[in-house]
Structures are given as C-alpha cells and as structure tokens.
Amino acid sequence: MELKKTYQWAMIVPTSMGIRLTPEAQGQPIHTSDRLLMQATSAETNVASVSACLGLPVKVLTTFVKGSPIAQFIKNSLGCRHLAYEGKEVEQGGPWGYRHQINIADCGFGSRGPRVWNDRSGEVGRTLNVNDFDLDRLFGQEGVQILHLSGLIGALSPDTGRFCLELARAARKYGTRIAFDLNYRASFWKGREEELRGIFTEIASLSDILVGNEEDFQLSLGIEGPEAGGKALAAKIDSFKGMIRNVKQAFPNASVFATTLREVVNANSHLWGAIMLEGDEWHVVEPRPIHVLDRIGGGDGFVGGLLYGILKGWEPEKWIQFGWATGALATTFLTDYGQPADEDQVWSIWGGNARVLR
C-alpha cells in the first residue's frame, strides 16, 4: 500500500472528546472510591495517539463547549499528546445545555471484572456537522494519507452519521485511504437500525481498511460470522477467517481486514491475538498471554499500531505485529490510550523483552 509522502496530515480522525474518571487507588471499584483521576478521552484519539507519539502529524476534528474549563483541559491534553485539533466552539446554553461526555470506569482486579458507566447526556460531540469543516481544504489542499473513522462517531447522532459519510466521500474523491473501525454499540443503534445500516454500509464500501470483531461485522453490516464467546480463541481462528472472507466478498474495494482476538483469564491476565487479511495473504498472531493493568483501549491501541505500520510503508507482516504490541502496550497504562516512547519500546513488547533499559 504505497502512500504519498507530501501530504500535510498522516491521519485525520473525527471524534467527540470527553473526560474519563477512574479511581486513584488502582484496582478499586468506583462505588468505594472518593478520589478520582481525570483524563481526556475518546476511542478515536486513542487510535491517533500511537502515530502522534511516534512523530507523525495527526489532526483531530471535533467540537468544544465554548468557555468550558473541561474543554480547555481537553485541548491541553491533545496538545501534550502531539495531536493538532480543529473544531467549532458551541455555546453551552446554560447549566442544562451542552457538555463534554463523561466516562466513569474502574479496571477491575483478578476475578472482579471492569465496569464502565457512560454519561453522554447533552454531549456536545453530537452536534458535529459537516458544514463546520472545509473538506476541500483538508483533503484537497492540505492532503491526508489516512482518514480513520469509528462507528462510535458514525452512530452518535444523525448529524455525526452524515459527517462521517461526507468525510468518507471527500476522502475517496481526493485519494485518501479510509480506515473504518466499526465499533458497534447497541444503545446507539436502538430505533435507528435502517438509517445506520445504510450509512455504515456506504462507508464500508468506500473503505480501504476494515476493522471489527464478530459482533461489529454481523450487527453493523449483516455479515455472517461466529458467535461471540464459546470455544477457545485458538479453535475459533478458522471461523474468524471465514467471517473475514465474507466481509471481503461483500466489500471488495477494501484490501485490509483485521480483528483482534481476546480471551480473558482474569482482569489482569488475557490471551491476546489478532488476524489480518491483506490482499489474499493471511497474517495471524496466535493468542499469547499479556499482563493487564487496565484493558480499556487495547483494541484502539491495536488499530493505532496497525495504521502506523501502514503509514510507515512497512511489510504487511509488521503491521499486525506492531498493532498487537501497541494494543498490549495500551493495557499497561492507567489511561485508556498508550503513549509509546519510541518504536523500539513497541518491538520489545512484541519480542517479549521486558528487561530494564538503562
């Protein structure tokens, strides 16, 4: 997959930014905690952070509550993560108006699984509108190598669905590659199945890279695949391959298809693997044990590493290896995104080398 080197942006991601609250005492549940840590978060910037931390130019398309200290906190965080941003400032409209979403989570411990509570009432990101951005400037004048889209944003509201669809159309017009992580959420789709199936299907038909698990492909696109859960991952790889073949047949314009494999031993010990089809070539990372501090964001980390490998022009085998390792890296952070120090740190994770580096 040869990519032009003259574009201003390696990647652009549309997103709805919010804050994530987690217990200060690591491993404790929310309901017993009286001190919380706050971070700026979104699934899409979790993906983008890999490339940004490793030196590639990345821009976030979003929207902010005007004058909000939380908005300023988010901007500061994006800057610290080397992420440029562009977005409309929306008036709050009083204390019952717009705000940034709140994600409340604990990471679990041992036999006690993680719990996540999303509070998205009044979310300003639902107002993301294609009319607030100059797509011809972004894709035509500045230039973008990869547009990364997430089903979370595509399904957030009618406005955001149209926004993602128009982004995909503009990207295709200007020769930008499109990566689409389906990220199906049942609560977002309730009562909107026909509308969203149409949007997701068109975006998928325009995409070069499709990522999703068995639920994502089946419920977002109606692709036949294996049931979630059930037998051990290693024994399900053939059925996952069959699902990906079905996706490729339905969406022949895409050339890369990927899914992660996860088996939870306990909250702090997982088996982590991945499957990728590039052209007609399969690349499989058999599930391997990883130690988990906080599992949230591991899948985003995988996509981030996969896209970084593509942007760097590596051989496809390295894309999935690097993605596997950046996904594993993300689960060692208290944040829901990983911030690799350099490529060597990621490759050390892939190689199983956790020795001290002096």
Image: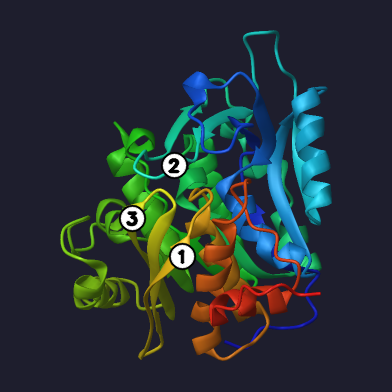
Q: Position of residue 121 (x, y in %)?
A: 52, 21
**Residue 217, label in figure:** none
Mark 2 to mark 1 CA distance (whole Å): 15 Å
Q: Image point 39% across, 60% down: which residue?
A: 270
Query: What number is the disc on residue 109?
Result: 2
User: Which comes sooner in the sequence, label 2 or label 1?
Assistant: 2
Q: Residues under labels 3 and 2: Cα distance?
A: 12 Å
**3 or 1: tag closer to the N-terminus:** 3
Which circle, 3 or 2, is nearer the viewer? 2
The type of residue carrying mark 1 is: Ile
Residue occupying the point 33% across, 55% down: 264
Classify mark 1: residues with Cα within 10 Å, few (<14), some (14-19) or many (20+).
some
Q: CA distance from mark 3 to mark 1?
A: 10 Å
Query: Which x, y percent locates residue 258?
Result: 41, 72
Residue 102 to residue 280: above or below: above
Of the two numbered discs 3 and 2 on the same chain, state the one appearing first in sequence.
2
Foreground pick, 177 / 319:
319
Who is closer to the viewer here, 269 or 186?
269
- Say what amino acid the circle numbered 2 marks: Phe
**Quadrant housing the N terminus:** bottom right
> What crowding class fits label 3: few (fewer than 14 Cα within 10 Å), some (14-19), or many (20 or more)?
few
Q: Quadrant of the C terminus?
A: bottom right
According to the picture, the residue beneath numbered tag 1 turns out to be 290
Give the answer, above or below, for where 184 lies relative to 263: above
| Residue 144 appears left or right of 245 | right
